[in-house]
Amino acid sequence: MLLSALGGRGSVPPELIKTVGHGTGTAVLAATSPLLNGIGGRYVADCNEAEVLDR
């Protein structure tokens, strides 16, 4: 899926490659953190709340 998002050409830049553990860490944190109980509708990335940009 990532290759198709990049146009399917060339190799994936190393800074975009994550291990399985790193790739799932944000989802696991968001799903299980007691700090987020009752909070929804947030975007998270790299284990932090992501800034929402108006375009």
Image (spheres, helix red, strand yellow):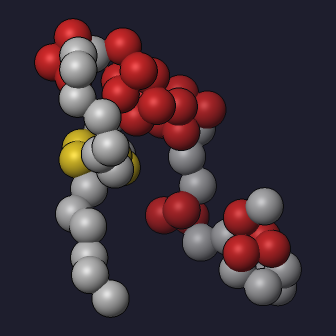
Q: Residue at x 41, y 21 (%)?
A: 31
Q: Is residue 16 left or right of residue 43?
A: right
Q: Is residue 27 left or right of residue 44?
A: right
Q: Nearer the viewer, residue 35 or 54?
A: 54
Q: Nearer the viewer, residue 44 or 15?
A: 44
Q: Residue at x 48, y 64 (%)?
A: 15
Q: Residue at x 35, y 24 (%)?
A: 29
Q: Is residue 32 left or right of residue 11?
A: left
Instruction: Point out residue 9 in the picture as x, y percentages from the top left corner.
Output: 82, 85
Q: Quadrant of residue 51?
A: bottom left
> Total number of numbered labels?
0
- Furthest-left residue in this view: 35
Q: Nearer the viewer, residue 31 or 23?
A: 31
Reply above or below: 26 against 2: above
Locate the C terminus and report the quarter of the image it occupies.
bottom left
Instruction: Point out residue 23 in the picture as x, y percentages from the top left corner.
Output: 53, 39
Instruction: Point out residue 8 in the picture as x, y percentages from the top left corner.
Output: 84, 80
Locate the N terminus and report the quarter of the image it occupies.
bottom right
Q: Nearer the viewer, residue 40 or 14?
A: 40
Reply above or below: 14 against 42: below
Instruction: Point out residue 53 in the picture as x, y percentages from the top left corner.
Output: 26, 76
Q: Residue at x 26, y 81 (%)?
A: 54
